[in-house]
Image (cartoon, rainbow, N blue to C red):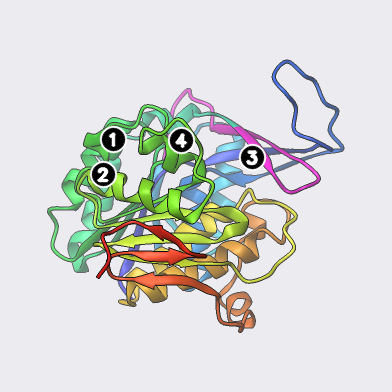
Amino acid sequence: MKPIVVLGSINQDMIIRVPDLPMPGETVLGRSLEIRPGGKGANQAVAASLLGGRVFLTGMVGDDGAGNQMITQIASRGVDISMVTVASGRLTGIATILVDDHGENMIAVAPGANSEVGTGHIKLAADILALEGGVAVAQMEVPEKTVTAAVHEFREMDGVVTMLNPSPVSGVSPEALNGVDIIVVNEVEAGQLARSARMVESYSQALDAAAVVASYGIRTVIVTLGRLGAVMYDDGDTIAVEPPPVEAVDTTGAGDAFMGALSVGVSSGWTMERSFDFAVRASAIATTRPGTQDALPSIHDIMDVEAELPVISRHSSSIRLSGEEVGGNGD
């Protein structure tokens, strides 16, 4: 298995449980408050580690008590944190997460020390990847210019596969996307990247959006669709699957579980289809538990979900879903 190097954010998550998510201008009373380690970079690193990956995390925390607490907990999950640095005079990033009784969530992030992640962290990551190749994973909770520079450097390295989760997607430029091997977005992010006025709500819309995103020079685009499952556009081939049947209680960690699992599959040399299947399972399991890092599954959890995933359709140029043609021009 090749190493997985994650360049990304490290946050302290403040999770408030509410009956319903608030409307603009509305105040709702929460039932509970939980403080846990988070940040997309840290979450995806932990997700991959719990699934057997050799994981290195590079990023920044503040010189406050929260930073030390976060990296200690991340290290306890098997992640190498030797490339995590401390930003003097800065606070550790904080995310406020509202989760309602249906498992849906709203998230606001104050980046804090994550705003200082820069070229030094790219070099630290490159030093690991130069030894034997591997998988480089990034998100957008650190400066876009840093992510863009990292993608451009890593894509030139022998044996390195680049993976990007462009979240949050606001302000992401085509330059940041160009040359990425694998991009994973949810239904909202897919619509935004495809310059659509609407959220993706069906398999056909997901594949249309994926094709647009792929036009930026990306080999593989995956759109996760919550309860509908996920769609993968892989160098012109397409596959859509439903998730295993689960009862969701909190969707907060689903996307990070997906990225972590996918990076493990890719670093293990699996086919994209097998890696995709593995990631869909991991994502579904993560929704059955509260929290983010605490909800991430282990390899044993995924192996317990033995039922074959329902494949909606698979095709090398176009697929049909319930009589609906999606993408391509037929055989």
Judge whether residue 184 can be spotted in this image. Answer: yes
Image quadrant holding the N terminus, namely bottom left
For mark 1, give the secondary structure: helix
Q: Secondary structure at mark 3?
A: strand
Of the residues under marks 3 and 2, which one precedes in the sequence?
A: 3
The residue lying toward the viewer, choosing from 195 and 152, is: 195
| Residue at point 42%, 43% (across, down) | 190
Q: Nearer the viewer, residue 3 or 273?
A: 273
For the residues labelled 4 and 1, the Cα–Cα distance comes to 15 Å
- How would you rate the neighbour count of disc 1 (Cα within 10 Å): few for under 14, some for 14-19, many for 20 or more? many
Residue to which mark 3 is pinned: 13
* 171 sits left or right of 176 in the view: right
Would you say 314 lies left or right of 46 here? left
Residue 85: x %, y % from top left: 40, 41
As helix, strand or loop, the secondary structure at mark 2 comes to: helix
Q: Quadrant of residue 160?
A: bottom left
Which of the two labelled residues, at mark 2 and mark 1, occupies the earlier sequence position? 2
Name the residue beneath numbered marker 1: 146
Q: Earlier in the sequence, mark 4 or mark 1?
A: 1
Q: Residues within 10 Å of mark 3 (few under 14, many from 20)?
A: many
The number of numbered badges drawn on the structure is 4
Q: Most extreme residue toward the top, as rendered?
A: 25
Q: Which residue is mark 4?
A: 168
In the rendered view of the protein, which quadrant contains the C terminus? bottom left
Kind of residue sitting beneath label 1: Thr
Q: Is residue 27 above or below residue 51?
A: above
Closer to the chain start, of discs 2 and 4, is: 2
Q: Earlier in the sequence, mark 4 or mark 3?
A: 3
Residue range highlighted in magenta: 84-107
